Image (cartoon, helix red, strand yellow):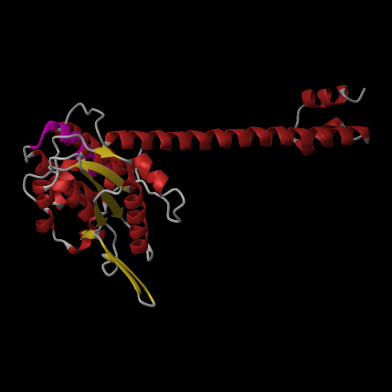
Protein backbone atom coordinates (compact mmCIF):
# COMPACT_ATOMS: atom_id res chain seq x y z
CA UNK A 1 0.00 0.00 0.00
CA UNK A 2 1.24 3.50 -0.90
CA UNK A 3 0.54 5.75 2.07
CA UNK A 4 -0.76 9.16 1.04
CA UNK A 5 0.46 11.89 3.42
CA UNK A 6 -0.20 15.53 2.60
CA UNK A 7 2.79 17.85 2.25
CA UNK A 8 1.16 20.26 4.69
CA UNK A 9 1.04 17.50 7.30
CA UNK A 10 4.68 16.59 6.70
CA UNK A 11 5.82 20.21 7.01
CA UNK A 12 3.84 20.56 10.21
CA UNK A 13 5.46 17.47 11.66
CA UNK A 14 9.02 18.26 10.64
CA UNK A 15 8.87 21.90 11.82
CA UNK A 16 7.63 20.75 15.20
CA UNK A 17 10.25 18.00 15.40
CA UNK A 18 13.16 20.16 14.25
CA UNK A 19 12.15 23.68 15.20
CA UNK A 20 15.55 24.70 16.59
CA UNK A 21 17.31 23.36 13.49
CA UNK A 22 14.67 25.10 11.36
CA UNK A 23 15.45 28.47 12.95
CA UNK A 24 19.21 27.87 12.82
CA UNK A 25 18.84 27.13 9.11
CA UNK A 26 16.89 30.25 8.14
CA UNK A 27 17.80 32.75 10.88
CA UNK A 28 21.23 31.89 12.32
CA UNK A 29 21.95 35.49 13.42
CA UNK A 30 18.60 35.77 15.20
CA UNK A 31 19.23 32.50 17.01
CA UNK A 32 22.66 33.66 18.18
CA UNK A 33 21.56 37.13 19.24
CA UNK A 34 17.95 36.79 20.34
CA UNK A 35 16.60 33.28 20.94
CA UNK A 36 16.84 31.55 24.30
CA UNK A 37 16.39 27.89 23.47
CA UNK A 38 17.37 26.90 27.00
CA UNK A 39 13.73 27.67 27.78
CA UNK A 40 10.91 25.69 26.21
CA UNK A 41 9.19 27.13 23.17
CA UNK A 42 5.49 26.60 22.63
CA UNK A 43 3.43 25.90 19.52
CA UNK A 44 0.23 27.96 19.58
CA UNK A 45 -1.82 25.97 17.07
CA UNK A 46 -5.09 26.31 18.96
CA UNK A 47 -4.57 30.04 19.50
CA UNK A 48 -3.75 30.59 15.83
CA UNK A 49 -6.87 28.71 14.78
CA UNK A 50 -8.99 30.91 17.04
CA UNK A 51 -7.38 34.10 15.74
CA UNK A 52 -8.02 33.11 12.12
CA UNK A 53 -11.39 31.49 12.65
CA UNK A 54 -13.28 33.92 10.42
CA UNK A 55 -10.51 34.32 7.85
CA UNK A 56 -11.59 33.64 4.26
CA UNK A 57 -8.54 31.50 3.63
CA UNK A 58 -8.69 29.69 6.96
CA UNK A 59 -5.80 28.12 8.80
CA UNK A 60 -3.91 25.39 7.01
CA UNK A 61 -2.04 22.48 8.49
CA UNK A 62 1.41 23.99 7.90
CA UNK A 63 0.65 27.42 9.36
CA UNK A 64 2.58 27.69 12.62
CA UNK A 65 2.70 30.20 15.46
CA UNK A 66 5.44 29.60 18.02
CA UNK A 67 6.17 31.41 21.27
CA UNK A 68 9.93 31.73 21.82
CA UNK A 69 11.70 33.35 24.76
CA UNK A 70 14.51 35.81 24.09
CA UNK A 71 17.82 36.32 25.87
CA UNK A 72 16.84 39.64 27.43
CA UNK A 73 16.86 39.70 31.21
CA UNK A 74 13.19 40.56 31.53
CA UNK A 75 10.21 38.28 30.88
CA UNK A 76 9.99 38.89 27.15
CA UNK A 77 9.07 36.64 24.28
CA UNK A 78 8.44 37.01 20.58
CA UNK A 79 6.22 35.13 18.17
CA UNK A 80 7.55 33.29 15.15
CA UNK A 81 4.89 33.12 12.45
CA UNK A 82 5.77 30.49 9.83
CA UNK A 83 3.98 29.85 6.54
CA UNK A 84 4.85 27.07 4.11
CA UNK A 85 3.27 28.16 0.85
CA UNK A 86 3.12 25.43 -1.79
CA UNK A 87 0.75 26.96 -4.34
CA UNK A 88 0.10 30.26 -6.09
CA UNK A 89 -2.29 32.54 -4.19
CA UNK A 90 -2.86 36.05 -5.55
CA UNK A 91 -4.19 37.17 -2.17
CA UNK A 92 -1.35 35.69 -0.15
CA UNK A 93 0.46 38.93 0.74
CA UNK A 94 -2.76 40.46 2.04
CA UNK A 95 -3.43 37.30 4.04
CA UNK A 96 0.03 37.59 5.62
CA UNK A 97 -0.80 41.14 6.69
CA UNK A 98 -4.16 40.06 8.14
CA UNK A 99 -2.43 37.29 10.08
CA UNK A 100 0.18 39.74 11.38
CA UNK A 101 -2.36 42.36 12.47
CA UNK A 102 -4.53 39.85 14.31
CA UNK A 103 -1.59 38.18 16.07
CA UNK A 104 -0.17 41.58 17.02
CA UNK A 105 -3.52 42.75 18.32
CA UNK A 106 -3.98 39.65 20.46
CA UNK A 107 -0.49 39.34 21.95
CA UNK A 108 1.22 42.72 21.50
CA UNK A 109 4.64 41.05 21.27
CA UNK A 110 7.33 41.23 18.57
CA UNK A 111 6.65 39.02 15.56
CA UNK A 112 9.13 37.37 13.23
CA UNK A 113 7.11 36.49 10.13
CA UNK A 114 8.51 34.03 7.63
CA UNK A 115 7.25 32.41 4.42
CA UNK A 116 8.88 29.36 2.87
CA UNK A 117 7.81 29.15 -0.78
CA UNK A 118 7.83 25.54 -1.96
CA UNK A 119 5.74 26.00 -5.12
CA UNK A 120 6.60 25.71 -8.83
CA UNK A 121 5.86 29.33 -9.77
CA UNK A 122 9.12 31.22 -10.26
CA UNK A 123 7.54 34.62 -10.78
CA UNK A 124 5.04 34.76 -7.94
CA UNK A 125 6.78 35.01 -4.57
CA UNK A 126 5.48 38.17 -2.86
CA UNK A 127 7.61 39.68 -0.11
CA UNK A 128 5.32 42.49 1.02
CA UNK A 129 1.77 43.76 1.13
CA UNK A 130 1.03 47.35 0.08
CA UNK A 131 -2.14 49.38 0.44
CA UNK A 132 -2.73 52.97 -0.64
CA UNK A 133 -5.83 55.11 -0.90
CA UNK A 134 -5.87 58.90 -1.11
CA UNK A 135 -2.83 59.54 1.01
CA UNK A 136 -3.35 56.57 3.31
CA UNK A 137 -0.47 54.19 2.74
CA UNK A 138 0.57 50.90 4.31
CA UNK A 139 3.53 48.62 3.59
CA UNK A 140 4.03 45.30 5.38
CA UNK A 141 7.26 43.43 4.58
CA UNK A 142 7.92 39.85 5.68
CA UNK A 143 10.84 37.40 5.44
CA UNK A 144 10.75 34.90 2.57
CA UNK A 145 12.75 31.99 1.22
CA UNK A 146 12.18 30.79 -2.36
CA UNK A 147 13.14 27.14 -2.67
CA UNK A 148 12.96 27.10 -6.46
CA UNK A 149 15.51 29.90 -6.77
CA UNK A 150 18.20 27.96 -4.87
CA UNK A 151 20.70 25.34 -5.96
CA UNK A 152 21.41 22.10 -4.08
CA UNK A 153 24.76 23.53 -3.00
CA UNK A 154 23.06 26.61 -1.55
CA UNK A 155 20.56 24.47 0.32
CA UNK A 156 23.18 22.22 1.87
CA UNK A 157 24.23 23.85 5.15
CA UNK A 158 26.87 21.73 6.95
CA UNK A 159 25.92 20.19 10.31
CA UNK A 160 22.27 21.17 10.04
CA UNK A 161 19.91 18.23 9.40
CA UNK A 162 17.25 20.59 8.10
CA UNK A 163 19.36 20.71 4.93
CA UNK A 164 18.14 17.21 4.15
CA UNK A 165 14.54 18.38 4.47
CA UNK A 166 15.18 21.25 2.08
CA UNK A 167 16.99 19.05 -0.44
CA UNK A 168 14.05 16.63 -0.35
CA UNK A 169 11.60 19.44 -1.10
CA UNK A 170 13.93 20.74 -3.84
CA UNK A 171 14.06 17.32 -5.55
CA UNK A 172 10.28 17.11 -5.34
CA UNK A 173 10.07 20.18 -7.62
CA UNK A 174 12.23 18.58 -10.30
CA UNK A 175 9.92 16.72 -12.69
CA UNK A 176 12.65 14.34 -13.84
CA UNK A 177 13.16 13.26 -10.23
CA UNK A 178 9.62 11.94 -9.80
CA UNK A 179 9.84 8.61 -11.62
CA UNK A 180 10.18 5.62 -9.32
CA UNK A 181 13.71 4.82 -10.43
CA UNK A 182 14.88 8.42 -9.96
CA UNK A 183 13.13 8.65 -6.59
CA UNK A 184 14.92 5.56 -5.30
CA UNK A 185 18.26 7.01 -6.43
CA UNK A 186 17.97 10.45 -4.87
CA UNK A 187 16.15 9.30 -1.76
CA UNK A 188 18.86 6.81 -0.91
CA UNK A 189 21.53 9.40 -1.74
CA UNK A 190 19.96 11.73 0.84
CA UNK A 191 19.55 8.87 3.34
CA UNK A 192 23.23 8.00 3.11
CA UNK A 193 24.26 11.64 3.25
CA UNK A 194 22.09 12.16 6.32
CA UNK A 195 23.34 9.04 8.10
CA UNK A 196 26.92 10.06 7.41
CA UNK A 197 26.41 13.46 9.00
CA UNK A 198 26.73 12.30 12.57
CA UNK A 199 23.36 13.68 13.61
CA UNK A 200 21.63 12.69 16.84
CA UNK A 201 19.72 9.44 16.64
CA UNK A 202 16.47 11.05 17.78
CA UNK A 203 16.44 13.04 14.52
CA UNK A 204 16.97 10.07 12.22
CA UNK A 205 13.45 8.62 11.97
CA UNK A 206 11.82 11.99 11.61
CA UNK A 207 13.87 13.03 8.61
CA UNK A 208 13.92 9.58 7.01
CA UNK A 209 10.14 9.57 6.92
CA UNK A 210 9.99 13.09 5.50
CA UNK A 211 12.28 11.87 2.69
CA UNK A 212 10.17 8.80 2.15
CA UNK A 213 6.70 10.33 2.03
CA UNK A 214 7.22 13.87 0.69
CA UNK A 215 7.12 12.47 -2.85
CA UNK A 216 5.00 9.36 -3.30
CA UNK A 217 6.18 6.43 -5.34
CA UNK A 218 4.06 5.71 -8.39
CA UNK A 219 3.74 1.95 -7.82
CA UNK A 220 3.42 -0.33 -4.77
CA UNK A 221 6.38 -2.35 -6.08
CA UNK A 222 8.72 0.63 -5.86
CA UNK A 223 7.43 1.43 -2.37
CA UNK A 224 8.04 -2.17 -1.30
CA UNK A 225 11.55 -2.24 -2.77
CA UNK A 226 12.43 1.04 -1.07
CA UNK A 227 11.10 -0.21 2.28
CA UNK A 228 13.04 -3.46 2.05
CA UNK A 229 16.29 -1.72 1.13
CA UNK A 230 15.80 0.89 3.84
CA UNK A 231 15.28 -1.82 6.45
CA UNK A 232 18.77 -3.15 5.73
CA UNK A 233 20.19 0.27 6.55
CA UNK A 234 17.90 1.19 9.46
CA UNK A 235 16.48 -1.98 11.06
CA UNK A 236 13.58 -2.11 13.51
CA UNK A 237 11.81 1.18 12.79
CA UNK A 238 10.15 2.98 15.69
CA UNK A 239 7.37 5.53 15.82
CA UNK A 240 8.91 8.94 16.45
CA UNK A 241 8.17 12.54 15.63
CA UNK A 242 6.84 13.03 12.15
CA UNK A 243 5.81 9.36 12.02
CA UNK A 244 2.79 10.29 14.13
CA UNK A 245 1.56 12.32 11.16
CA UNK A 246 2.24 9.40 8.81
CA UNK A 247 0.49 6.89 11.06
CA UNK A 248 -2.51 9.19 11.28
CA UNK A 249 -2.60 9.45 7.48
CA UNK A 250 -2.35 5.66 7.21
CA UNK A 251 -5.21 5.25 9.69
CA UNK A 252 -7.36 7.68 7.71
CA UNK A 253 -6.47 5.97 4.44
CA UNK A 254 -7.35 2.51 5.79
CA UNK A 255 -10.57 3.91 7.25
CA UNK A 256 -11.51 5.36 3.85
CA UNK A 257 -10.82 2.04 2.13
CA UNK A 258 -12.82 0.07 4.70
CA UNK A 259 -15.66 2.60 4.43
CA UNK A 260 -15.68 2.26 0.65
CA UNK A 261 -15.80 -1.55 0.92
CA UNK A 262 -18.60 -1.44 3.50
CA UNK A 263 -20.51 1.00 1.28
CA UNK A 264 -20.08 -1.31 -1.69
CA UNK A 265 -21.28 -4.31 0.35
CA UNK A 266 -24.27 -2.39 1.69
CA UNK A 267 -25.10 -1.29 -1.84
CA UNK A 268 -24.87 -4.88 -3.07
CA UNK A 269 -27.09 -6.06 -0.20
CA UNK A 270 -29.67 -3.36 -0.80
CA UNK A 271 -29.65 -4.16 -4.51
CA UNK A 272 -30.21 -7.84 -3.75
CA UNK A 273 -33.12 -7.02 -1.43
CA UNK A 274 -34.71 -4.63 -3.92
CA UNK A 275 -34.28 -7.14 -6.75
CA UNK A 276 -35.82 -9.89 -4.65
CA UNK A 277 -38.80 -7.68 -3.73
CA UNK A 278 -39.41 -6.71 -7.36
CA UNK A 279 -39.13 -10.35 -8.49
CA UNK A 280 -41.44 -11.45 -5.66
CA UNK A 281 -44.19 -9.07 -6.78
CA UNK A 282 -43.77 -9.96 -10.45
CA UNK A 283 -44.00 -13.71 -9.77
CA UNK A 284 -47.11 -13.19 -7.65
CA UNK A 285 -48.81 -11.27 -10.48
CA UNK A 286 -47.97 -14.01 -12.98
CA UNK A 287 -49.32 -16.73 -10.69
CA UNK A 288 -52.50 -14.73 -10.19
CA UNK A 289 -52.90 -14.61 -13.98
CA UNK A 290 -52.47 -18.36 -14.25
CA UNK A 291 -49.05 -18.53 -15.93
CA UNK A 292 -47.25 -21.86 -15.53
CA UNK A 293 -44.51 -22.28 -12.96
CA UNK A 294 -42.00 -23.46 -15.59
CA UNK A 295 -42.54 -20.29 -17.64
CA UNK A 296 -42.22 -18.08 -14.55
CA UNK A 297 -38.99 -19.83 -13.49
CA UNK A 298 -37.48 -19.32 -16.95
CA UNK A 299 -38.41 -15.63 -17.11
CA UNK A 300 -37.21 -14.65 -13.63
CA UNK A 301 -34.51 -17.28 -13.04
CA UNK A 302 -36.05 -18.50 -9.78
CA UNK A 303 -36.52 -22.04 -8.42
CA UNK A 304 -39.58 -23.99 -7.24
CA UNK A 305 -38.86 -23.10 -3.60
CA UNK A 306 -39.23 -19.42 -4.47
CA UNK A 307 -42.52 -20.16 -6.28
CA UNK A 308 -43.85 -22.08 -3.25
CA UNK A 309 -42.86 -19.17 -0.96
CA UNK A 310 -44.86 -16.74 -3.12
CA UNK A 311 -47.90 -19.08 -3.28
CA UNK A 312 -48.05 -19.19 0.53
CA UNK A 313 -48.80 -15.48 0.61
CA UNK A 314 -51.64 -15.89 -1.87
CA UNK A 315 -53.74 -18.18 0.32
User: For the point 67% across and 34% down, which residue is it?
Assistant: 270
Quarter-of-image position of residue 243: top left
Q: Please state the total of marks drawn on the protein image.
A: 0
On the picture, is 21 further left or further right than 12?
left
Between residue 87 and residue 260, name the one nearer to us: 87
Between residue 179 and residue 200, name the one nearer to us: 200
Quarter-of-image position of residue 154: bottom left
Q: Can residue 36 be seen in this view?
A: yes
User: For the point 46% across and 34% down, which residue is it?
Assistant: 255
- 297 vs 97: above or below: above
Q: Does the magenta stretch include residue 205?
A: yes
Q: Is residue 257 magenta?
A: no
Q: Is residue 88 visible?
A: no
Residue 158: give x, y in percent of width and height.
6, 48
On the picture, is 86 further left or further right than 284?
left
Residue occupying the far front of the picture: 74
Residue 83: give x, y in percent of width and height.
29, 52
On the picture, is 13 further left or further right than 69?
right
Between residue 61 and residue 5, name the one nearer to us: 61
- 101 vs 139: above or below: above
What secondary structure is the stretch in magenta mostly built from? Answer: helix
Q: Which residues are drawn in magenta?
A: 199-213
Amino acid sequence: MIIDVSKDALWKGIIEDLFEEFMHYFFPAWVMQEADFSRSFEFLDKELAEILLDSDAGIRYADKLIKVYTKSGVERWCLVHVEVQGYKDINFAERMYIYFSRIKEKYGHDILAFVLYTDEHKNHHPQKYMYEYWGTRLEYVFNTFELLSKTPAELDIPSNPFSIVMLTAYNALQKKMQTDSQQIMWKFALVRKFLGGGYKTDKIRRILNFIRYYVKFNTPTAEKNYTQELSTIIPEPKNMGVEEVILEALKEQVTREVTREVTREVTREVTREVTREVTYKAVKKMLEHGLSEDLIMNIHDVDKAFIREVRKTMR
